[in-house]
């Protein structure tokens, strides 16, 4: 006959208590990251409104495009920039080929021969986007450096609207509004589009009281005097804005500078890209960890921790919810329901990714 011991019961109860604590903490962090933080930012934007000033200024601009094997889109992208509503004598375009092996070089060189505003540079060995931007920044003549992806298509007035916030001397970096074109109906494409709508709104709110934490590499700009050459393994559209913050200037979002890009073809490509972005962003945060000091950087330290670090760690908290709910499966109806609900959610997500 089996004998129950008080010690065994205490061990089970303790295990259940730890599981519940892990579940509650993990769930609370996830709610804070995606709902609580945006709500607090909205509240701050009402209580501590510090909207940047804008004006119709026309500084000289250099648009920098890094390209690797982009023969399918590079000519259209460069032509799009040449046709923007911006004074011709104030516009320069530099395209850096990262040792492309397709027809990219010939296409850009051909355009450069036709229009003196276009400068073509080539990296003989593949060194990545960051190295390409560093190379272009050395020869750029514009007061404002604008960064575009090789497939980014700007609205006619995008450049005019992108430079307006630089009329405010406190602004050092400006990012615009990305709109994804879902060329093929898919769960991945719809997810990207929905995510960008959420992120654009959050950036707009953050700009109303301070600086934004994340920018979009396809539509952002910096004062040339604030550009610093970056390590080639650093994500440029994350590291450079952090260096601007470090130098006491603001990073802001303007919803009037619009850019459109097509979503990636499938979920696996999107997942791989997101993993690369997160890993490189975490590496950049390590280099700028001093920005997490609230005594020196105030609200931005809280923003960086909440908007980026906790969000990047979200998969760990999701895993914490799943594992802890498994241990609570036999602990009453309320606790037991969470495990099958999560399993069903992930199965639906998996099925949707294959559509």
Image (cartoon, rainbow, N blue to C red):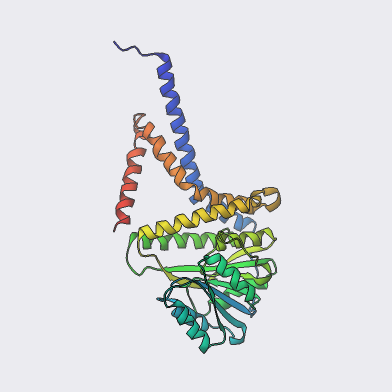
Q: Position of residue 233 (x, y in %)?
A: 55, 59
- Depicted 241 relative to depicted 58: above or below: above
Q: Quadrant of the C terminus?
A: bottom left
Q: Position of residue 258 (x, y in %)?
A: 50, 72
The residue that appears at 63% across and 54% down in the rendered structure is: 300
Q: Position of residue 168 (x, y in %)?
A: 68, 70
Location of residue 329 by image quarter: top left
The residue that appears at 44% across and 39% down in the rendered structure is: 320
311 or 65: nearer the eye? 65
Q: Residue furthest front?
A: 124
Can you see residue 339? yes
Q: Residue furthest top?
A: 1
Q: Quadrant of the N terminus?
A: top left
Q: Position of residue 19 (x, y in %)?
A: 44, 32
Q: Residue furthest bottom?
A: 114
Can you see residue 204? no
- Depicted 152 relative to depicted 295: above or below: below
- Depicted 293 relative to depicted 198: above or below: above
The residue that appears at 48% across and 51% down in the rendered structure is: 34
Location of residue 223 by image quarter: bottom right
The residue that appears at 57% across and 66% down in the rendered structure is: 131
**Numbered marks: total:** 0
Q: In the displayed structure, does residue 312 sit left or right of residue 344? A: right
Q: In the displayed structure, does residue 45 sit left or right of residue 105? A: right
278 or 54: nearer the eye? 278
């Amino acid at each position: 006959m089996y004998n129950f011991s008080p010690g065994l019961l205490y061990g089970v109860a303790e295990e259940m208590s730890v599981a519940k604590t892990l579940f509650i903490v993990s769930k609370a962090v996830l709610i804070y990251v995606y709902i609580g933080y945006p709500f607090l930012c909205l509240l701050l934007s009402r209580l501590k409104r510090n909207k940047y000033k804008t004006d119709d200024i026309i500084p000289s601009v250099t648009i920098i495009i890094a390209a690797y094997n982009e023969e399918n889109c590079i000519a259209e992208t460069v032509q799009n920039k040449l046709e923007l509503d911006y004074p011709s004598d104030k516009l320069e375009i530099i395209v850096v080929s990262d040792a492309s092996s397709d027809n990219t070089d010939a296409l850009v060189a051909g355009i450069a021969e036709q229009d003196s505003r276009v400068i073509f540079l080539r990296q003989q060995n593949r060194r990545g986007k960051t190295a390409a931007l560093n190379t272009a920044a050395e020869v750029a003549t514009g007061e404002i450096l604008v960064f575009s992806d090789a497939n980014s298509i700007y609205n006619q007035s995008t450049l005019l609207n992108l430079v307006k916030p630089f009329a405010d001397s406190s602004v050092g970096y400006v990012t615009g509004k990305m709109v994804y074109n879902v060329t093929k109906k898919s769960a991945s494409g719809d997810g990207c589009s929905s995510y960008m709508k959420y992120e654009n709104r959050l950036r707009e709110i953050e700009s109303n009281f301070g600086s934004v934490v994340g920018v979009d590499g396809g539509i952002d700009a910096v004062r040339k005097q604030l550009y610093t050459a970056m390590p080639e393994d650093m994500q440029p559209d994350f590291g450079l804005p952090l260096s601007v913050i470090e130098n006491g200037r603001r990073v802001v979002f303007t919803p009037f500078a619009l850019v459109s890009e097509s979503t990636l073809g499938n979920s696996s490509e999107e997942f791989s890209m997101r993993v690369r972005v997160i890993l490189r962003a975490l590496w950049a945060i390590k280099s700028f960890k001093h920005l997490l000091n609230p005594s020196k950087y105030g609200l931005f330290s809280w923003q960086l921790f909440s908007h980026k670090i906790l969000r990047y760690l979200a998969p760990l908290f999701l895993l914490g919810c799943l594992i802890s709910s498994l241990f609570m499966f036999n602990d009453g109806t309320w606790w037991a329901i969470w495990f099958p609900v999560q399993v069903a959610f992930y199965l639906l997500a998996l099925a949707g990714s294959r559509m």
